[in-house]
Image (cartoon, rainbow, N blue to C red):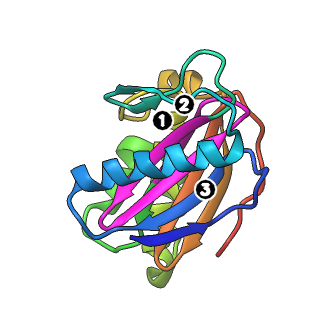
């Protein structure tokens, strides 16, 4: 495994690290948990360790100082930690493909679809990946699964704010907090 690459500074609303591990998803999940345990121990050696595994990932015990979120894309693992609430993170590759406009319209809504429509061809893959990673991060922060765009869904996600979006080597990483602090977009 390539050592973790920090994508945000320490103290960001959601701190992000990118790990590179070209193995099976099961082994990536294990590596993410090993990283999480080591990072939590580094930050607070006296804190009780452990979490409960859920279908959405590790759930920290009540009263824990840190919450986590993970996203997997090919050989990459995006790890997020926050002390401000429940984070959601997502990692999406910027690749052009047929049908991207339909997917953005269906899931991200009319504003994102309009932005994609006016994107120059060379920027279209980035526009899609940025919109998609933001949606997925907001959904994860609010502990919701993927659902089509609707005004009702947007009301449910209204408390979710993107705290950071970072582009790194053709990948878009997004972080969100549901009801937490927000920050500026960054490029890397």
Marks 1 and 3 close (CB-CB < 8 Å): no
Residue identified by numbered label 3: 16
**Tag shown at residue 140:** 1
- Looking at marks 1 and 2 on the same chain, the residue that comes earlier in the sequence is marked by 2
x then y, percent, for residue 126? 49, 71
Choose top left, top right, bottom left or bottom right for residue 101.
Answer: bottom left
For this orientation, the residue located farthest to the top is: 62
- Looking at marks 3 and 2 on the same chain, the residue that comes earlier in the sequence is marked by 3
Rendered position, 84 above or below 128? above
Marks 3 and 2 close (CB-CB < 8 Å): no
- In the picture, measured across the screen, residue 98 lies left or right of residue 146, that is left
- Looking at marks 1 and 3 on the same chain, the residue that comes earlier in the sequence is marked by 3
x then y, percent, for residue 125? 42, 72
For this orientation, the residue located farthest to the front is: 46
Dominant secondary structure of the magenta stretch?
Answer: strand
Question: Mark 1, residues whose alpha carbon is within 10 Å: few (<14), some, or many (≥20)?
Answer: many
**Tag shown at residue 49:** 2
CA separation in Å, label 1 and label 2: 23 Å
CA separation in Å, label 1 and label 3: 15 Å
Q: Nearer the viewer, residue 26 or 93?
A: 26
CA separation in Å, label 3 and label 2: 20 Å
């Amino acid at each position: 495994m390539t050592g973790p690459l920090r994508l945000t500074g320490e103290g960001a609303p959601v701190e992000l690290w990118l790990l590179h591990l070209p193995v099976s998803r099961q082994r990536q999940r294990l590596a993410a948990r090993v990283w999480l345990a080591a990072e939590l121990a580094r930050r607070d050696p006296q804190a009780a360790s452990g979490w409960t595994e859920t279908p959405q990932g590790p759930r920290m015990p009540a009263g824990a100082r840190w919450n986590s979120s993970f996203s997997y894309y090919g050989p990459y693992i995006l790890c997020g930690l926050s002390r401000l609430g429940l984070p959601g993170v997502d990692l999406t590759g910027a690749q052009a493909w047929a049908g991207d406009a339909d997917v953005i319209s269906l899931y991200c809504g009319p504003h994102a679809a309009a932005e994609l429509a006016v994107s120059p061809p060379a920027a279209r893959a980035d526009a899609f990946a940025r919109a998609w990673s933001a949606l997925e991060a907001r959904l994860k922060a609010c502990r919701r699964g993927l659902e089509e765009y609707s005004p009702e869904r947007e009301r449910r996600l209204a408390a979710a704010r993107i705290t950071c979006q970072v582009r790194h080597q053709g990948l878009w990483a997004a972080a969100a907090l549901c009801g937490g602090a927000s920050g500026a977009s960054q490029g890397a």
